[in-house]
Amino acid sequence: MSNPTAPRIWQLAERRYRLIGVECQKCKKRYIGPRKICPNCGSRDLKDVLLSRRGKIYSYTVVRVPPRGRENYGPYIIAIIELEDGCRLTAEIVDCSPDDVEIGKEVELVFRKIGEENEAGVLYYGYKFRLAGK
Ligand SMILES: [Zn+2]
């Protein structure tokens, strides 16, 4: 009947986009995304875990010519992030200029609107990272 309130939508988005991985119960290595067998030790005893929301920049690139659909977006930063867990993922770094970004700098997970659906007015959120601290 009624539309969910904004905080409710936010809650749903956050639940949906938190970083979930698996941890090997034998060697304690963590991986992003579903797996059945640990690539490190071959164990099948893997459990879902929430991954760390902090990490550091492993490498990055500045995209100065945005792809189609993002023409107005300007230069943006795509980085490989190494989480405190040891997992690596690729994500955008937001809230800073390309000059502020350096390999090894600490970053933290944030949720950002990544698109909007016109008819239903549904907002899409995704994970991105920003420089941590300060
Ligand atoms: Zn293992």
Image (spheres, rainbow, N blue to C red):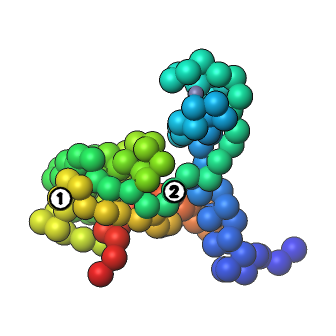
Q: Image quadrant of ligand 1?
A: top right
Is the residue under label 1 in contact with that under label 2 (CB below 8 Å)?
no
- Closest to the camera, between mark 2 and mark 1, is 2
Position of 106 with respect to 116 (left or right) is: left
Q: CA distance from mark 2 to mark 1?
A: 20 Å
Q: Secondary structure at mark 1?
A: loop
Percent position (x, y) of residue 79?
29, 50
Q: Residue at x 23, y 55 (%)?
A: 104
Percent position (x, y) of residue 14?
62, 65
* Nearer to us in this view, 91 or 34: 34
- Crowd tier of the residue under label 2, counting other residues whose Cα lies within 10 Å: few below 14, some 14–19, many 20 or above: some
Checking the image for residue 117, the label placed there is none
The residue that mark 1 highlights is 102
The residue that mark 2 highlights is 52
In what quadrant of the picture does the N terminus appear? Answer: bottom right
State whether residue 51 appears in this view.
yes
Position of 65 with respect to 48 (left or right) is: left
* Nearer to us in this view, 5 or 16: 16
In what quadrant of the picture does the C terminus appear? Answer: bottom left
Tally of marks: 2
